[in-house]
Image: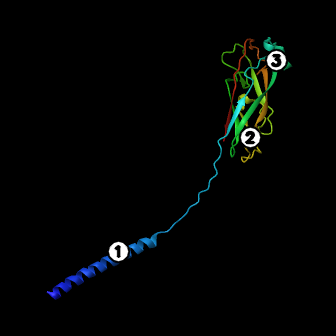
Amino acid sequence: MIMAGWKNFMQIFNRLVRTGLGTGVYLMSFLGSASAATVNFSAQIAYEGACEITVTPTITFNNGQAILPSQIEAKADVTKQTFNLILANCKGIKVTPKIIVSGNVNSTYGQDLFLDSGSTAVGYGILLSTAGNTTFQANSNLATNKQISAVKSWNVNTNLATINGTLPLSAALTCANCTAADRVGGKLNASVTFDFQYE
């Protein structure tokens, strides 16, 4: 009886020891693998470019009085108008600004000119151009290029707040082919939209 009891005691003891040691090894293994690692993230986020554009809503040549074809051919002062595109509240960095020009274009007489389809005048249109400024390149015919691009020296690190100001534009009432015999006088309208964009 004593021997049997002793054997049972030893079996239970050994079992507890093995269990305890196993648990200890497990805990030591778990604690040994625990560590801390840190990663630092860094990024520079570009501002989305934004700029408000305003312009004179209506430009009328010769105060609304009829202009003679001969005056248009001679490029008289009454056929010319200058105005400014005003840029305000511009913001952003890491972008290159540009202004997209849109409107109905007629090139029937060999030169791209802005001309609305409802106009009754034939052979005439608006030649729109810009001399540019420190930010934007000159463009001699916006009906052809339809874009006012940033100067080639533009630095993308430049804050767009620096472009606030005016961009001079010129509009000329012209005949694409002033020798065309089928030109017809009448009402001429042209609507042009300027849209600030960036890339």
Q: Pick whichever, 122 or 148, lies toward us.
A: 148
Q: Earlier in the sequence, mark 3 or mark 2?
A: 3
Q: Give the residue at mark 2.
A: 161
Q: Earlier in the sequence, mark 3 or mark 1?
A: 1
* Helix, strand or loop under label 2: helix
Looking at the picture, does residue 196 appear above or below residue 61?
A: below
State the separation of the CA atoms marked 2 and 1.
Answer: 67 Å
Looking at the picture, does residue 168 appear above or below residue 75?
A: below
Q: Give the residue at mark 1.
A: 23
Q: Are marks 3 and 2 in contact (CB under 8 Å)?
A: no
State the separation of the CA atoms marked 3 and 2.
Answer: 40 Å
User: Residue 83 at what x, y percent from top left?
Assistant: 79, 26
Amino acid type for the residue under numbered disc 2? Ala
* Helix, strand or loop under label 3: helix
* Quarter where residue 10 is shown: bottom left
Q: Are marks 2 and 1 in contact (CB under 8 Å)?
A: no
Mark 2 surroundings within 10 Å by alpha-carbon count, few (fewer than 14), some (14 through 19), many (20 or more) = some
* Quarter where residue 66 is shown: top right
Q: Give the residue at mark 3.
A: 72
Amino acid type for the residue under numbered disc 1? Thr
Q: Is 190 left, or right, of 8 in this rendering? A: right
Amino acid type for the residue under numbered disc 3? Ile
Q: Residue furthest front?
A: 2
Mark 3 surroundings within 10 Å by alpha-carbon count, few (fewer than 14), some (14 through 19), many (20 or more) = some
Quadrant position of the N terminus in the picture? bottom left
State the separation of the CA atoms marked 3 and 1.
Answer: 101 Å
User: Residue 162 at what x, y percent from top left?
Assistant: 76, 41
User: Residue 189 at what x, y percent from top left?
Assistant: 71, 17
